[in-house]
Image (cartoon, rainbow, N blue to C red):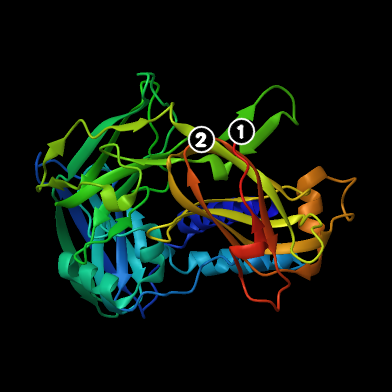
Amino acid sequence: MRILAGALLVFAGSLFAQQSAPATQPPSTGQVSGRVFCSDTGQPGRFAGVQLIAEQPSKTPIIDPASLGKDANFEKVLAAAMTTLTKGSNLSTVTTLDGTFSLDKVPPGTYYVVAQIPGYQSPLSQFSQLERMKADDATIKAVESAAEKIVVQPNQAVHIDIRLERGASLSGSVRYDDGSPAPGVAPVLMTLDKDGKWKDLGPTSMLPTTTDDRGHYRIFGLQGGKYAVKAALPTVQAMSGLGAGSISMHINVGDALVVYSGGALRDQDVKPVELGTGQEIDGIDIVFPISGLHTLSGNVVSKADNHAIDSGIIELVDSETKTKLRSAMFEQDGGFHINYVPDGQYILKVTSAEDTDRTAGEDSGGDFARMLHSKTLKSYGTAELPILVKSDSAGLILQVPDQSAAPARGGNSMQSPKTP
């Protein structure tokens, strides 16, 4: 919570700094002004976000969560993060009602001007948030080829007009196979790269798009290309009742079955939808199956003496592609449960297995506090169990070897599943 509060304070501080900055322009900087238009309407681009992206964008995060969480002097760390964030405040702004903008204290240099309005194409819309943060050479070149280039000189003004093109859109519904809608689900947009591999683009803004009460969604502002959409069962839910302590979060990531548009359950079976420039395509539906799903359960134990391992991760892996489909932490008694597994051939894999001392914090926050304060007593290697799923399977046993031993694969390192 301290990290989240710190981030919010940093954001609020940056806004205050932008609003209260002095109007005088230092002699070592330049000015950039202009106007944003929407090409399809000819009207101003009102409240568009405008950014100046340097030729060599910074790859250092503005806020380091690790520092905020570990540094005892929280106030000084927060102040340093605020100072760092406000350094970039002179390189972005928002247009007014007539579509105009002005940046009055721009350091000299070469920049690419990017404007963004929901529903319109942006040079950044083809990249995920992670790719934008990494800013590798390929990403920079793609932005440079699509954005307007300007050179800012000291004590000089640069004016630029930007016309935004209406983007394409995909829309459809997310529902269960009995016809009932799946509200509050966040569809994930995928694009087919030139190498034939699917890439997640994720949400196109700071907040993810979720389905409405009828299960409908619409993803817009897209460039032409080949796309698909996927969604996971909404197994993560936040609830709020009455009273200060009534907020609760239920997280069952291991149960989050992913389904792709067109009914595929694996990304290699997904059929792309080809979008032309400005084209709108509806009916790209995702249907969660209700029948034909199974539960896998069992325990993780030490290979040496069969005692329960109290900390680690259980993964469900596609046996053909070796792709990790889901992962979850197993319980303190070594038990695990993975629900909503379709028929198929899989591998159950254990990683990060440890014996821990969770006595610290047991009276001050329950399981989560014990996990945060746990001390590693012994680490173990990995273990894998191939399994053909056609029905519920209980009593699965995965035996993890000592850290120095080779990964456990078949043989005596695990027992056969007991299928009821």
- Seen in the picture, residue 214 relative to 89 is either above or below; the reply is above
Position of 42 with respect to 418 (left or right) is left
Which residue is farthest top?
Answer: 179
Sooner in the amino-acid sequence: mark 1 or mark 2: 2
Q: Indicate the quadrant where residue 91 lies.
A: bottom left
Q: Indicate the quadrant where residue 354 lies.
A: bottom right
Q: Quadrant of the C terminus?
A: top right
The amino acid at mark 2 is Ser
Q: Which labelled disc corresponds to residue 391?
A: 2
Position of 315 with respect to 230 (left or right) is right
- Seen in the picture, residue 299 relative to 210 is either above or below; the reply is below
| Residue 158 visible, this orientation | yes
* Mark 2 crowdedness (10 Å alpha carbons): few <14, some 14-19, many ≥20: some
**Residue at point 21%, 67% (across, down):** 195
Residue closer to the observer: 254 or 308: 308
Q: Position of residue 190 (x, y in %)?
A: 29, 51
3D distance between C-alphas at marks 1 and 2 = 8 Å
Q: Position of residue 36 (x, y in %)?
A: 19, 51
**Residue at point 46%, 63% (across, down):** 22
Q: Are the residues at dot 1 and dot 2 in contact (C-beta closer than 8 Å)?
A: yes
Residue closer to the observer: 211 or 102: 211
